Image: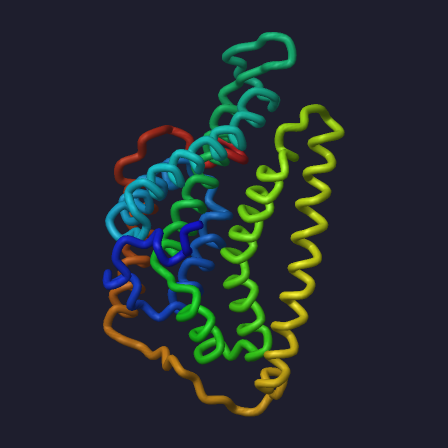
């Protein structure tokens, strides 16, 4: 199973050098800003802008980026389709049985879909350019997260590849014993039970060993600690802040200066 580090193409890109705490705070603020946007034009421009930003600065390989974007598009489409097909409205465009598409439902659904897609692009910008170790060290140093919580989360994150490898080993062992050749609902249930019980027991043992090791290293103490990695500030942080401000401002500016639709307030009216 591939390690998480191998899906990054180049960790020397300048977006990786941004302080992770600042990046996390900036990305979180974007979620709050676009959560309350009801102008369809603003969401269209925001989707285009942050998609372009991700394609320019994203650290994932082209293959991973393609599948992530495709999956994001599919999820956003299905989240929008529920409102588009089954919401009520006065200006009906199409009706067939339970399916009713109106201008109101169409605009609300597109707004929801674009918002979901934009959130995903913003999240991918953060996830594809942030190394987990630097992120948790930054949380401890800049945001003053308690050490026991930060290292606990980091240890849990590092266990995910181990659990994936363990799943593959269990599947290979079951295949050698001929258990995968059995058909039927009961056979599937028995396989799932073996997977679940084995991985649960191993996870409990691993968590117990990790907890004992962390306690031996005095991670539960609240005193001041030294860190192997010192996360500081640089000019890249200023550039990142400027990019966010320009990206958000451009979306609102173009929605007024170059509107692509007449729907400026989807939830209340047009």
| Residue lying furthest bottom | 223
| Residue lying furthest top | 96
Left-right relation of 140 to 249: right
The percent position of residue 135, horizontal first and vertical second, equals 43, 68
Instruction: Look at 38% across and 38% down and name the residue there.
Output: 69
What colouring does the structure picture have? rainbow
The percent position of residue 214, horizontal first and vertical second, equals 60, 79
Q: Can you tell which quarter of the image residue 19 is in?
A: bottom left
> In the displayed structure, would residue 102 be above or below residue 144?
above
> In the displayed structure, would residue 41 be above or below residue 135?
above
Whether residue 21 can be seen here:
no
The percent position of residue 23, horizontal first and vertical second, equals 38, 64
> In the displayed structure, would residue 146 be above or below residue 165?
below
Instruction: Look at 46% across and 45% down and name the residue there.
Output: 37
Q: How many marks?
A: 0
Whether residue 155 can be seen here:
yes
Q: Nearer the viewer, residue 76 or 171?
A: 171
Left-right relation of 232 to 98: left
The percent position of residue 228, horizontal first and vertical second, equals 40, 83
Instruction: Look at 26% across and 36% down and name the residue there.
Output: 258
Q: Which of 72 and 152 is in front in this view?
A: 152
Instruction: Look at 37% across and 58% down and name the residue there.
Output: 5
Q: Which of 162 and 73 is in front in this view?
A: 162
């Amino acid at each position: 199973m591939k390690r998480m580090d191998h899906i990054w193409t180049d960790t020397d890109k300048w977006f990786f050098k941004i302080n992770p705490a600042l990046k996390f705070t900036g990305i979180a603020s974007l979620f709050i800003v676009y959560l309350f946007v009801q102008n369809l034009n603003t969401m269209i421009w925001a989707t285009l802008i942050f998609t372009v930003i991700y394609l320019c600065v994203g650290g994932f390989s082209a293959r991973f980026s393609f599948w992530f974007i495709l999956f994001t598009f599919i999820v956003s489409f299905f989240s929008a389709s529920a409102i588009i097909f089954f919401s009520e409205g006065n200006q009906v465009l199409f009706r067939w049985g339970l399916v009713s598409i109106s201008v109101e439902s169409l605009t609300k659904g597109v707004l929801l879909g674009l918002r979901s897609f934009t959130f995903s692009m913003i999240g991918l910008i953060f996830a594809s350019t942030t190394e987990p170790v630097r992120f948790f060290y930054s949380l401890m140093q800049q945001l003053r997260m308690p050490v026991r919580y930060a290292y606990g989360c980091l240890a849990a994150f590092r266990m995910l590849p181990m659990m994936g490898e363990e799943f593959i080993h269990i599947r290979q062992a079951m295949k050698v014993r001929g258990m995968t050749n059995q058909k039927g609902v009961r056979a599937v249930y028995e396989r799932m039970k073996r997977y679940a019980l084995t991985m649960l027991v191993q996870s409990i043992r691993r968590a117990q060993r990790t907890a004992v090791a962390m306690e031996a290293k005095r991670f539960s103490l609240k005193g001041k600690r030294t860190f192997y990695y010192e996360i500081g500030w640089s000019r890249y942080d200023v550039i990142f802040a400027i990019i966010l401000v320009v990206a958000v401002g451009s979306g609102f500016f173009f929605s007024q200066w170059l509107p692509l639709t007449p729907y400026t307030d989807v939830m209340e009216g047009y």
